[in-house]
Image (cartoon, rainbow, N blue to C red):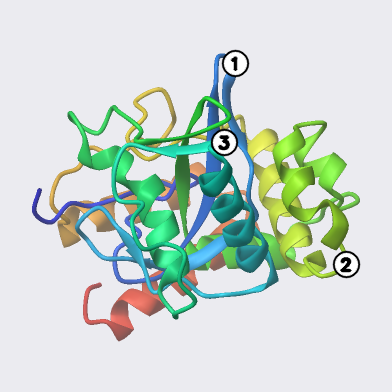
Amino acid sequence: MGFSDCKCMLTGVSIDFIGTMAVILRCTPSGYEPVSLGISGDYDGAGHLDGLRADPGTELLYDHLKRCLRNGRLVATYGDDGLDTDDDYRLDRMIGLIENYWMEDGYQQPTVALDGAPLVYATIARPIWDAIATTASSGPATLHTIFGDHPIPHEIFGAHEAEVDVQLRELARIVDFVSAHGLRWAQPFDPDQRYPTDGDQRDTDVNNERVAQARLDYRDNPAVLAGLDAYVERLKEEGLA
């Protein structure tokens, strides 16, 4: 499909070239439900995440999804051959099954379902995630406070909360931010969100306008403003600001 831009769910700035955090979402009749912790990687400009970083949360997620693929709870339309490997790219391939949703029929058809519900993911620019996750206040960071009673996250992480404490605390702050600012969890191309992705090619001038708009939208939020400063510095390092 060629090169296409992708926006940060929280601010609307491009996630190209600066690192991204993804959160797997389960599509339900009432909306999107997060089922994973944050997954760190890079957006390749062509509709894919790659270079995913392994951490305790991603290892637990991969193991769970692989079990579900084997026992039939996770159903993929295509691309599930060769996943039962132990090489360094197994996580990229597993998440690749989920990201294929935006390669189908105008980005509208998810190609993976877990327990009958499609899986997609949200994208957040890494500098924005880091600024919110490290400076914003939050209540207790437990599976219940973040995910409620939704069973899938409890299946994945329930016996390992201590191992993923850092990732839980980060996501708790992001969840608080989404709620406090009237946002909603959504995959990038969902039009019913504040900053939907349109799939156009990246344009530096357009992205500069998005940064300016985000600064205006969050002019009273020091954490986001600091994140935008870090974002712009990262773009300058890449020669893209």
Q: Quadrant of the C terminus?
A: bottom left
**Label 3 neighbour load within 10 Å: few <14, some 14-19, many 20+:** some
Q: Position of residue 16 (x, y in %)?
A: 29, 63
- Give, as a three-letter code, the residue at label 1: Ser
Identify whether 185 is placed above or below 98.
Answer: above
Horizontally, residue 135 falls left or right of residue 204, namely right
| SS at badge 1 | loop
* 62 and 44: which is toward the camera: 62
Q: Residue at x 36, y 63 (%)?
A: 82
Horizontally, residue 239 falls left or right of residue 236, namely left
**Label 2 neighbour load within 10 Å: few <14, some 14-19, many 20+:** few
| Residues at discs 1 and 3 in contact (Cβ within 8 Å) | no
Mark 3 to mark 2: distance in Å? 27 Å
Mark closest to the chain's N terminus, 1 or 3: 1
| Residues at discs 3 and 2 in contact (Cβ within 8 Å) | no
The label on residue 73 is: 3
Answer whether residue 57 is visible to the viewer in this image: yes
Front disc: 1 or 3? 3
Q: Residue at x 71, y 61 (%)?
A: 170
| SS at badge 3 | loop
Q: Position of residue 29 (x, y in %)?
A: 55, 14
Q: Position of residue 2 (x, y in %)?
A: 8, 54
- Give, as a three-letter code, the residue at label 2: Ala
Mark closest to the chain's N terminus, 3 or 2: 3
Answer whether residue 131 is visible to the viewer in this image: no
Front disc: 1 or 2? 2
Mark 1 to mark 3: distance in Å? 21 Å
- Give, as a three-letter code, the residue at label 3: Arg
Mark closest to the chain's N terminus, 1 or 2: 1
Residue placed under numbered mark 2 in the picture: 162
